[in-house]
Amino acid sequence: MTRRIPLPRPGRGAPAARLAEMLRVDHAGEMAAVQIYRGQKRVFEAAGRSGIAADMARMEGEEDVHLKRFEALLTEKQVRPTLMTPVWRLAAYGLGVGTALMGEKAAHACTEAVESVIGEHYADQAEEMTDRDPEMAAQFRQFRDEEMAHHDHAIAEGAHEAPAYPVLSAVIKAGCRAAIKISEKV
């Protein structure tokens, strides 16, 4: 069985270093989510699909609340954002545009794939921080629940009916997992 929760690191400063990794990743993830929804919204607006564009705008706004919280935490804890921010911003916007161009179901499949990885990620972080920082663990649980609401909404809107859903979902999930690992360190 693979352990999703890292073992505690030994040494002085290790808890602060681990928290910095978490905040760097979470900031990058929320910035990327905003960009995905922004790209999807713009495609649907341009296509005159105001209903789905409004849906994407709503989720973009909810992700922006998370982003602002992590921006504040980066400043408060004196943690630098990932150096990959410009790359992730462009890649996420491109993912949003690309999936929207594939259609509404593909846009929802993107949401479902991203949020499933992020939901697991926040759950793992909450578990890891429960004893060390219960307030931060509670924040991670709250964000996990909000992300899972997007996940469930995407499924209800037909995410699994997207063209080539299994491949699309697997590729997006793999990309998210890779971005998490890279953002922890870079």
Image (tube, rainbow, N blue to C red):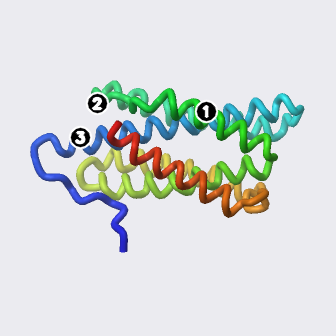
**Amino acid tagged 3:** Ala
The kind of residue tagged 1 is: Gln
Task: Please report the residue visible at 41 percent of the width from the left and 45 percent of the height from the top.
Answer: 139
Determine the residue positioned at 64% across, 54% down: 112
Measured in 3D between alpha carbons, the distance from the residue under mark 3 to the one under mark 1, in whole angstroms, is 27 Å
Mark 3, residues whose alpha carbon is within 10 Å: few (<14), some, or many (≥20)? some
Numbered mark located on residue 77 in the image: 2
Instruction: Answer few, some or many: residues within 10 Å of disc 1's Cα (few below 14, many 20 plus, some between 14 and 19).
Output: many
- Could you tell me if the residues under marks 1 and 2 are in contact, i.e. CB atoms within 8 Å? no
Q: Residue at label 1?
A: 35
Q: Is disc 2 placed on a helix, strand or loop?
A: helix
- Number of other residues with Cα within 10 Å of mark 2, as a class: few under 14, some 14 to 19, many 20 or more: few
| Location of the C terminus (image quadrant) | top left
Seen in the image, is 33 located left or right of residue 186? right
Q: Nearer the viewer, mark 3 or mark 2?
A: 3
Of circles 1 and 2, the one toward us is 1
Q: Which residue is mark 3?
A: 17
Spatial CA distance of label 3 from label 2 is 11 Å
> How many numbered markers are drawn?
3
Q: Earlier in the sequence, mark 3 or mark 2?
A: 3
- Residue for point 71% across, 59% down: 155
Outermost residue, left side: 12
Residue 129 position (above or below residue 166): above
